[in-house]
Amino acid sequence: MNSVNGHDYLYYVNGNFAPASQASLRLDDLGLVRGYGVFEVLRTYGVRPFGLRAHLERMQRSAAQIELDLPWSLAEIEAIVEETLARNDPTDVTIRIIATGGASSSFLMPEGRPSLLVMLAAVKPYPEEMYRRGATLITYDCPRFMPTVKSLNYITAIIGQRRAKAAGAIEALHCDAQGVISECTTSNFFIVRGDQLITPSVDVLPGVTRAAVLELAGDLFEIHERSIHRSELALAEEAFITSTTKEIMPIVRIDDQVIGDGAVGVHTQRLLHLFRSAVAQDPFPVLTHS
């Protein structure tokens, strides 16, 4: 149970607020019976949501790609999120925003009544030891469904995460039969080679943290947004993944391939320091163009 001072977080569900333990959605909702919907996850630093508008813009793009008509403007959803935060203790929480096709009498076709949910949970930070020593990945040959859409269809991601956990890895890295790497199940992927920062840009979800890192890295690296082949991992000096909850997580091994010298690289350390310094400032000096 999510709690704030011993009480449930209040969730927003279709115009109402209810404690997490009592919040409910109709069983004929297309998000439940068909996985038809999109979502976003962001977090607060202190009480300030990071990249809220950028996340909502991405959610709007995702919805358009699956032909889910959202009746709310970005400003209206933003106001709902802000009210949800105001009704809770918003200190260091994740904010999950979900839009579904809504209730359907046929259990298949949308009927013009989409659902909107805003759910909060306490941030669960990764141990600092992982940032000092680095984490590992496994590769996973299973294509994502509509990779540029942050959809509710998470079957391949769940399988990948289960396999990663069984192998003691933090994430599963999508790598197809031709050896082309795209992204992890819930993170974007980067490698460093010399003065080059390389990250895939095709068939990947355009991460908000990814965009912040690219902005911070603009004066430090020659940035290449292109496909990465598995054979390049042997030449990579550093690697890291980015996401809302992982921030910039150093990667020191992928399957049996050690990255660089097997230690967290200085460039990754510097980017992590810059990112954490940026999110500590008010206003955030990144994502200024989102």
Image (cartoon, rainbow, N blue to C red):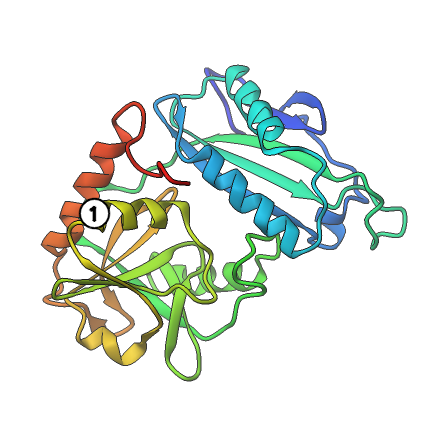
**Is 143 positioned to the left or the right of 280 in the image?**
right
The residue lying toward the viewer, choosing from 203 and 246, is 203
For this orientation, the residue located farthest to the front is 289
The residue lying toward the viewer, choosing from 62 and 224, is 224
Residue drawn where x is 68% and y is 26% of the image: 22
Q: Is residue 25 above or below residue 143?
A: above
Q: Position of residue 16 (x, y in %)?
A: 70, 22
Secondary structure at badge 1 equals: helix
**Disc 1 designates what residue?**
131
Viewport quadrant of the C terminus: top left
**Residue 8 appears in the picture as rendered:** no
Q: Position of residue 95 (x, y in %)?
A: 50, 33
Mark 1 is on which residue type? Tyr
Viewport quadrant of the N terminus: top right
Which image quarter: residue 241? bottom left
Q: Position of residue 211 (x, y in %)?
A: 35, 48
Q: Position of residue 254 (x, y in %)?
A: 27, 69
**Is 105 positioned to the left or the right of 170 in the image?**
right
Residue drawn where x is 36% and y is 65% of the image: 200
Question: Label 1: how many residues lie within 10 Å, few (<14), some (14-19) or many (20+)?
Answer: some
Residue drawn where x is 52% and y is 59% of the image: 148
Which image quarter: residue 24? top right
For this orientation, the residue located farthest to the bottom is 178
The residue lying toward the viewer, choosing from 238 and 58, is 58
**Is 274 positioned to the left or the right of 36 in the image?**
left
Which image quarter: residue 94? top left
